[in-house]
Image: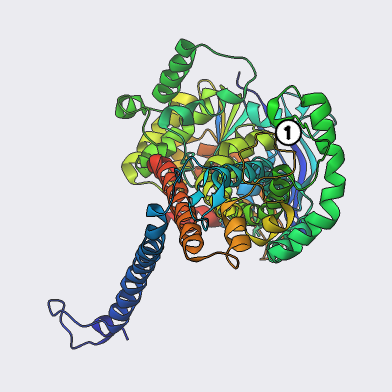
Amino acid sequence: MAKRIDVNNLNAYYGTFRAVADVSLTIEPRSVTAFIGPSGCGKSTVLRSLNRMHEVIPGARIEGSVALDGEDIYGDGVDPVNVRRTIGMVFQRPNPFPTMSIQENVLAGIKLDSGRKSKDELSEIVERSLRGANLWNEVKDRLDRPGAGLSGGQQQRLCIARAIAVQPDVLLMDEPCSALDPISTIAIEDLIHELKNEYTIVIVTHNMQQAARVSSSTAFFNLAATGEPGRLVEINPTDQVFSAPREKATEDYISGRFG
Amino acid sequence: MNQGLSDPRSSISGSAVRRGDQIFRLITVGSGILILALMTSIGIFLTWKAIPSFSHNSSNFFTESKWFPDQSTPIFGIAALAFGTFVAALIAMILAVPTGIGTALFITYYAPKKIAGAMAFFIDLLAAVPSIIFGLWGLQFLMPHMQGVAAWLDRYLGFIPIFQNRSDLYTKSLLIAGVVLAIMILPTISAISREVFNQVPRNHVEAALALGATRWEMVRMAVLPFGRPGIISASMLGLGRALGETIAVALILSAVFEVNIHISEPGGNTFAANIALKWNEAGPNGLSALIASGLVLFLITLAVNSIARGIIARRKDFSGA
Ligand SMILES: Nc1ncnc2c1ncn2[C@@H]1O[C@H](COP(=O)(O)OP(=O)(O)OP(=O)(O)O)[C@@H](O)[C@H]1O
Ligand SMILES: [Mg+2]
């Protein structure tokens, strides 16, 4: 299941604008890696390069390689569709499909798989995924109600359930809590703790405490000036990054935030 | 205009008069009432003018196909008109709705940017072409070229009665009228669907793609369900135009007052075309009869729209709006 990711010399472009330069890093399986850094430094861009979602933006492309357990996901003959089925993603703004019920939302990814599943199997997947996302108890009586009728925090957990329903190898989360209240945030952080036993998780966050709480490694990105591409400053075990960062820039950023 | 908030002297409890709001309310409520009043008065007018013909008819208005309202014993009915209108509109919808949606999808999600822009431009242009032009084109160009298609349908699908042709004449048929109507309403359906597809939120599209949906799966998962109410509205607008289209149909059909299920044979007639063709030669009872047929068309249009509204409203919770 959980797989290791090796990013090698990643450069990401929007048209002619290079948003990210020369990023190389390794993400260990069954770990949580946090991406931190100032706004616009390319965290989302790097994250979206990890499951080939970057290229769905018109004009966007990358150079370099990203390997999943040694296999280049940008290699010739690799279908991005398969990459995205293996590497799930949760977005900053909860985005359940508004035209689908809670249950249909959870099964949205499953329905894409060619094999037909029985009703029992499907309801089992629904329950397992919703339990996995800590949402089961809250919605089990209204699975056929619209997913958009849930609270923001519930919607985000529904999106997590949808992402883990297909049992991906890796889960990417782009500021999954930024639109949520503290209680929902803690619920999702707890969830991340549980999920890391099975998945490789990468999470982008603006919240230092959150990075410190949930992650085992932290990658700090920075950009020299606006218009310059963002770069990876360092990636190290989280305790080290927060207690004794190797780079001065990291220390400035972290202490600035911690006050 | 908004004095309530900007005027420091006004207190929270005082009901400050917001003139902008009032004017806005007046305009919206006023135009709402105006539209209702218009619809009702049209309905009343039609009924009023139609009533005389009901008592001057020796036949059944709904089941009779013939149209001789000005004879000494008037015989007329809408059976052939209703059938022709229905068939022509149905053919138009069967051809235009899938193609219109397909074109819109192609433009929004498949075509390279430059081609998409050019296509969108031409479709919008097409939507503005007057129907007489479509009629002339149908008559002069499409009709000769459709003969082969109709003959082919007769030869290979002739065992299905509607495609059978017993006359060896393939022109001036409901089939051709339907095809012309389809081409006429296609731009409308396509242009509106395109607007709707363009409004599908980016994050729904990305949600589908991130789950590993192919482009077609993404369209089915995120775009079509979201666009469903819009697609229905677009189709209804197209259907409305098809039902009411007069001049193009009048040009193409050779008016025959009979219900003929062999749609590629010459003949057929529609409400709108019949009104246009018969109006000038009609006597007093003839005019009243034509208005009665117009009333039926009016009611059909209302019914079709209400049904569409109903379909849209049924899954309102899931609309995403
Ligand atoms: N769709 C896009 N088109 C063009 N440029 C973009 C696009 N998305 C991002 N960029 C640019 O790429 C750079 C990196 O953006 P990115 O979204 O990766 O930053 P981020 O670190 O995630 O920021 P934030 O913390 O605000 O989310 C920025 O300069 C941004 O303006
Ligand atoms: Mg971001």
Figure colour scheme: rainbow
* Vertical order, A24 against B46 (above or below): above
Q: Residue at x 49, y 55 (%)?
A: B72
A63 relative to A129 in the view: left or right: right
- Horizontally, residue A142 falls left or right of residue B275, namely left
For ligand 1, which image quadrant applies? Answer: bottom right
Chain where mark 1 sits: A
Q: Is residue B36 above or below residue B112?
A: below
Q: Quadrant of residue B218?
A: top right
Q: Which residue is mark 1?
A: A80
Residue B254 screen position, x and y as percent: 72, 51
Classify mark 1: helix, strand or loop.
helix
The location of residue A15, given as percent across then percent down, is 77, 57
The residue lying toward the viewer, choosing from A201 and B183, is: B183
Instruction: Choose top left, top right, bottom left or bottom right for residue A70.
Output: top right
Query: Looking at the image, how many numbered discs can be counted on the residues?
Result: 1
Residue A47, percent from left and from top: 63, 42
